[in-house]
Amino acid sequence: MKKQRTTPRRVRAAAAWAATALAALVLAAFQTIAFGSDAPADRVPPPAIATAPVSAAAGSQSASFDGVVEAVRQTQVAAQVPGAVVALNVRAGDRVQA
């Protein structure tokens, strides 16, 4: 009959502690990579831009300019409770106020 080897309790406890510590480090690394760090040293100051005062041009009453606004980042938005949008009271191009 073979004698079964058992792992001492201290070794199992140390292995469990090491696995927990490793999991915490991996999770922290993932969070830093995925969401960035809020540390002030990581923040890059915004670039300097040139500005000029705005004034009306001679002979024109109004001006119109077309443009496109694009987001720097995208994210998915999800509700915490299930539901459905049953009405949307605005259309593309409508003016809305906050």
Image (spheres, rainbow, N blue to C red):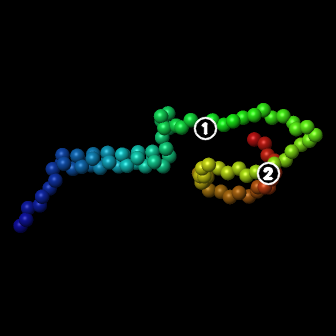
Report the front residue among 35 and 13: 35
Left or right: 64 with respect to 76?
Answer: right
| Residue 47 circle label | 1
Q: The C terminus lies in which quarter of the figure?
A: top right
Quadrant location of the N terminus? bottom left
Which residue occupies the extreme bottom position in the image?
A: 1
Q: Could you say which is closer to the camera, residue 14 or residue 36? A: 36
| Outermost right residue | 59
For the point 35% across and 49% down, which residue is it? Answer: 23
Q: Earlier in the sequence, mark 1 or mark 2?
A: 1
Is disc 1 placed on a helix, strand or loop? loop
Q: Which residue lies at the image location 71% right of the left edge and 50% below the top edge?
A: 69
Q: Which residue is labeled 2 in the image?
A: 66
Looking at the image, can residue 77 be seen? yes
In the displayed structure, 95 sits above or below 86; it is above
Query: Tag 2's secondary structure?
Result: loop
Counting from the top left corner in percent of width and height, residue 52 is at 75, 34
